[in-house]
Image (cartoon, rainbow, N blue to C red):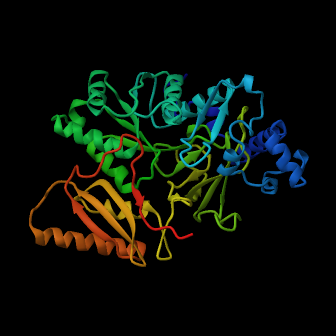
Amino acid sequence: MDTKSEYLHPEMETLSIEDIRKLQLERLKATINHCMNSEFYKKRFAENGLKPEDIKTLDDLKKIPFTTKQDLRDNYPFGLRSIELKDCVRLHSSSGTTGNPTVILHSQKDLDEWANAVARCLWMVGLRPDDVFQNSSGYGMFTGGLGFQYGAERLGMLTVPAAAGNTLRQIKFIKDFGTTAIHAVPSYVTRIKEVMDQQGIDPKKDTKLKILAIGAEPHSEAQRKRIEEMLGVKAYNSFGMSEMCGPGVAFECKEQNGLHFWEDYYIVEIVNPETLEPVPEGEIGELVLTTINREAMPLLRYRTRDLTRILGHDCPCGRHHVRLDRMKGRSDDMMVLRGVNIFPIQIETILMQFKELSTNYLITLTTDGDNDNMTVEVELEDLFTDDYTQLEKLTKDITRALKDEILLTPHVKLIAKGTLPVSEGKAVRVVDKRKVYE
């Protein structure tokens, strides 16, 4: 392991676009043949008159039907596996609060590759074996805990499996263990800073923090920059999902100009979520991923429901793996209010432009009479004034900015800091109380 190298796996990270495509086609063909061990894919191919040998080029991938979350639920728990259950060593699953959970199986090889991918991500942003990595993420079925744990260990760092919550303990660990890097969801990072302030701790002077890995919930560029300023660190966006393995699917490099998706592990497509046809490069669409380096449960053309766009391939960091924009929202998280499509991230982006506001907010949708309405409650950064005139002006300015963005006029309520509940996992940003008409 050459700690001076910018690349942990230079033979894969510095592949040319042409060599990436050659490797992808080779791995795609092998994956499709392997998928014929899955009863689900064997039946899906037969129903559509397809044979593995019909996939001769990467463009032929479009012949294969999409795989969806519903397919995983309908074939719960193990219907999509491509190896014997006795050869699987771990599973992760979603909560399944609205039906069968989605279950993903892993072989030992899958876990090894997953650890390698996460380690590659962490190395890319400058972490090395002499760093101390604190994982403030949930463990168990949630992939963020074990995914980052094994990746950080594979890189060789001293790893602190702090898990989520118990903020005072988190801060004690940061100080006592000399933590230099943390993984946490953005909303919880803000909570850590609030408690540090209460304890009289200056993270820039009293800790060794230098890098944050943030992800798991949508956040704006403004929120990322605010986090960096608060803690005096660099905060890098991470993308992962349990269906693909978890964290390690994509990560920013030091250039912070988009998420590098590891194309030796995945084939990336961007499609129109309504027509399911490819969109031109640079246009926003739904992210579709195909695994090409998985053994237990490969997935072909999986609809992630995440909305993003391709930014390019070449990067000053020397990697040519495709770069995608931060997730703009999810096609299934979209709010439709009076015929207008709105994503929570649009509202957050506007709120973060006001220095008087904190990062904690809640969007509530209600039905009043025959009309659907939106209320945006947002905490003040500090009770900067008790002058009603100033508060009224700020409320009007925020309302006007939101209307310009979402084309509707929400009801904005400014509330004292600490009023809204603080989540130690993913923050709850939207509560829909509208009536449902069958």
- Residue positioned 11% across, 69% down in the render: 388
Residue 132, image quadrant: top left
Q: Position of residue 379 (x, y in %)?
A: 24, 56
Q: Quadrant of the N terminus?
A: top right
Q: Is residue 373 above or below residue 238?
A: below
Front in this rendered view, residue 16 or 369 = 369
Residue 288 relative to residue 167: left or right:
right
Q: Position of residue 432 (x, y in %)?
A: 43, 61
Q: Is residue 181 above or below residue 278?
A: above
Q: Is residue 145 above or below residue 266?
A: above
Q: How many marks?
A: 0
- Residue positioned 51% across, 55% down in the render: 327
Residue 252 relative to residue 413: left or right:
right
- Residue positioned 53% across, 41% down in the render: 95
For this orientation, the residue located farthest to the left is 387
Front in this rendered view, residue 141 or 402 = 141
Residue 34 relative to residue 357: left or right:
right
Q: Position of residue 435 (x, y in %)?
A: 46, 68
Residue 372 in sight in this render: yes
Front in this rendered view, residue 10 or 206 = 206
For this orientation, the residue located farthest to the bottom is 370
Residue 16 in sight in this render: no
Q: Position of residue 161 (x, y in %)?
A: 42, 25
Q: Quadrant of the C terminus?
A: bottom right
